[in-house]
Amino acid sequence: MKIAVLPGDGIGPEVTAQALRVLEALSLPGLTLFEGDVGAVAYRRHGHPLPPETLEMARAADAVLFGAVGDFSCDDLPRHLRPEQAILGLRAELTLFANLRPAAGFPGLEDLSPLKPEIARGIDLLVVRELNGDVYFGDKGERDSAGGREGWDAMSYNEAEVRRIAHTAFRAAQKRRKKLTSVDKANVLETSRIWRETVIEIAAEYPDVELEHMYVDNAAMQMCRSPGQFDTIVTGNLFGDILSDQASAVVGSIGLLASASLGERQTEFGTFGLYEPIHGSAPDIAGQGKANPVAAVLSLAMLLRHSLGREEEANRVERAVAQVLASETRGGDLGGTASTSEIGDAIVSTLLTIS
Ligand code: NAD
Ligand code: IPM
Ligand code: MN
């Protein structure tokens, strides 16, 4: 079992280090780790945010454990050299079109949500975010206009792209509470009209799943008003990015939410995938031991489950995290005082008590 570890920038290395301690504590036989440079750190060392050797390392692995990328020092670089291109490049080059972002409340954290505890308690949803298309990957550029320089980004989805993510989402909903909310902006966007019609076409193959459609502006409002109504959400790249950050706040902190980015490639042990927190490099707290490593540790749990076929270990890690959060070992993002490594210590020692 080969894992490519790409810690990246800012708090990426800090939180990834804790996930690796948890992995080590599991003592899995036959595991080899490779570490590569991505993001601003890779740009500084190799002149590119996603050096070819890093991409090859990721391709050759059974799974990729990714930290975060992004650094203000790169703000003025041309787009193709910016750190964010590393994660976009990995998602595109490895055809990781399905991004699973689960958001469920943790017992003991209800009072930390900005929502009323009884509303926060009900949250248990999965955002299935399309990851290879939309305005992220359309033609873009700058041109002259009567109003001065004009930036433009083309938004599009074709039926094939919508069909494959819709299948992923319906199958995920079948394993959950069998309700799928497709989020779009079909009242305004042609992209969304094709999206909605295609999701409806695929729904015929999943009669056991209840499908509803919701405009993204309403979905953002409902995510605050009553997040418990959502089971599985399927949406495009941009809307999924925004709604999942919002869902994290409802749960209590962006430092808690993990993600799996999957495609169709199967390995000997499961589905090839890239695993990363939904948060970024958090330059405001980087290097201070203030980052919550839970999102990275839960990303490792998703890696164990989806790419290594280690459901039992994945469950153990998730239970250890839940116990630690309930025990009030929490960082500043959750009103506590524990440092990144103290949270890691607590997760590792709790893990060793769970068989
Ligand atoms: P961010 O997610 O990095 O941070 C947003 C806020 O949440 C900050 O106040 C930060 O301190 C806090 N935060 C984030 N993760 C935390 C954690 N684990 N524990 C405690 N607090 C945490 O988003 P941003 O500030 O908008 O972006 C910063 C950089 O990260 C940018 O360069 C952006 O492009 C990049 N980014 C990268 C990824 C990725 O690598 N996949 C994701 C999002 C943003
Ligand atoms: C995320 C991030 C990325 C995205 C950026 C860094 C390109 O916000 O992983 O959620 O927009 O997908
Ligand atoms: Mn994001």
Image (tube, grey):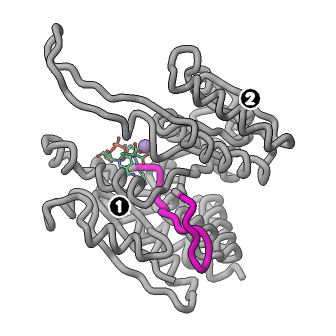
Q: Is residue 266 magenta?
A: yes
**Helix, strand, or loop for circle 2?**
strand
Residue sitting at x 23%, y 65%:
51
Residue sitting at x 30%, y 59%:
288
Kindly identify which numbered label has been placed on residue 12.
Answer: 1
Whole-percent x, y for residue 158 in the image? 52, 35
Q: Amino acid at mark 1?
A: Gly
Viewer-side residue, 245 vs 194: 194
- Would you say the residues marked 2 and 1 are in contact, meaning their CB atoms lie under 8 Å apart? no
Q: Is residue 296 magenta?
A: no
Residue sitting at x 45%, y 46%:
132
Q: Quadrant of ligand 2?
A: top left
Badge count:
2
Q: Would the CB of label 1 be found within 8 Å of ligand 1?
A: yes
Whole-percent x, y for residue 69 in the image? 31, 55
Residue 287 in view in this figure: no
Q: Identify residue for label 2.
A: 212
Q: Amino acid at mark 2?
A: Glu
- Does residue 241 appear to the left or right of 288 in the view shown? right
Kindly identify which numbered label has been placed on residue 99.
Answer: none
Whole-percent x, y for residue 350 in the image? 62, 75
**In the image, which residues are magenta?**
262-279
